[in-house]
Image: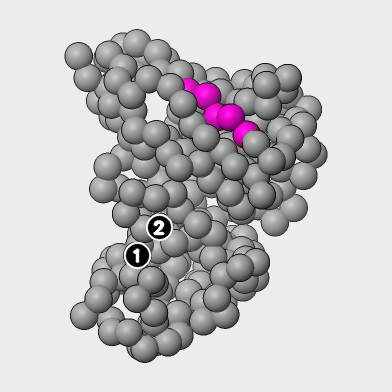
């Protein structure tokens, strides 16, 4: 199985900050990496697919990059509604998709 | 806009069978552009992929669950279902159904989720 490791597991930031979340795969997954946002009691929502493609309707302050084993999700100019938990997911080994353990973004 | 809605018992006894249904509106599960998937999340934990159904009738499963899981569909009702046999407390989780974009391999739409507790 491909293991996905996110860092940090949690972070505190302020409105207006720029934050970066990292996701590392245990082996190369090309660009088959997606990012999701989950708020308490809600289903995850896709933000970025195939490493750097912004899902329709997602604000442009979200961006993704990377390939191979190392990927990043960057949120520029943090807004109050961005405080949530973020997950990466590899879709390289179908059907054994795996998710990262999550990164909880909290208000400082 | 497609909508997915999970339904089924919220409480299942250990060793029994968990059965959930996902009703899809605003889109057809016969569409060749999507897979129809199940994902679960234990309380306070991460996401685990369970498996998926495709319009040809084919299914794929997470190998770690394959021996206990079946995903099927009723095209006439635009529903797909999940069955997990011999459940234990470890199967307690919020279960989500989701629509996977086949071309770009990501979960494009999700149901709201339903909590299933395994307890006597």
| Lateral position of residue A79 relative to residue B50, left or right | left
Q: Which of the 4 quarters of the picture holds residue A9? A: bottom left
Secondary structure at badge 1 equals loop
| Lateral position of residue A9 relative to residue A5, left or right | left
Mark sitting earlier along the chain (2/1): 2
Q: Chain of mark 2?
A: A
Residue at the spot 49% in from the left edge and 31% down from the top edge:
B6
Residue at the spot 22% in from the left edge and 19% down from the top edge:
B119
Q: Nearer the viewer, residue B117 or A91?
A: B117
In the rendered view of the protein, which quadrant contains the C terminus of chain A? bottom left
| Lateral position of residue B32 relative to residue B54, left or right | right
How crowded is the residue under tag 2: few (<14 C-alpha within 10 Å), some, or many (20+)?
some
Q: Nearer the viewer, residue A56 or A12?
A: A56
In the image, residue B100 sits, relative to residue A33, either above or below, namely above
Q: Main secondary structure of the magenta part?
A: strand
Residue at the spot 48% in from the left edge and 74% down from the top edge:
A73
In the image, residue A73 sits, relative to residue B9, either above or below, namely below
Tell me, yes or no, whether the highlighted magenta stretch contains residue B23: yes
Q: Chain of mark 1?
A: A
Q: Which region shows up in magenta?
A: B20-24
Residue linked to disc 2: A38
Residue linked to disc 1: A84
In the image, residue A78 sits, relative to residue A96, either above or below, namely below
């Amino acid at each position: 199985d491909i293991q996905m490791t996110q860092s940090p597991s949690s972070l505190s930031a302020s409105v207006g900050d720029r934050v970066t979340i990292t996701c590392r795969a245990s082996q190369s997954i090309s660009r088959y990496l997606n990012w999701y946002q989950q708020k308490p009691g809600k289903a995850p929502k896709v933000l970025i697919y195939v490493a750097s493609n912004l899902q329709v309707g997602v604000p442009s302050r979200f961006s993704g990059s990377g390939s191979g084993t190392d990927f990043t999700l960057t949120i520029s100019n943090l807004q109050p509604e961005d405080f949530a938990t973020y997950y990466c997911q590899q879709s390289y080994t179908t059907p054994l998709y795996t998710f990262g353990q999550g990164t909880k973004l909290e208000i400082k | 806009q497609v909508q997915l809605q999970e339904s089924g018992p919220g409480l299942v006894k250990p060793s029994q069978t968990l059965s959930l249904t996902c009703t899809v509106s605003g889109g057809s599960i016969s569409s060749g552009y999507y897979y129809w998937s199940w994902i679960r999340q234990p309380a306070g934990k991460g996401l685990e992929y369970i498996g998926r159904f495709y319009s040809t009738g084919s299914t794929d499963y997470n190998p770690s669950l394959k021996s206990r899981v079946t995903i099927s569909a009723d095209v006439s009702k635009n529903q797909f279902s999940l069955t997990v046999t011999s459940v234990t407390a470890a199967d307690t989780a919020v279960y989500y159904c989701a629509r996977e974009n086949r071309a770009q391999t990501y979960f494009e739409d999700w149901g709201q989720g339903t909590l299933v507790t395994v307890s006597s």
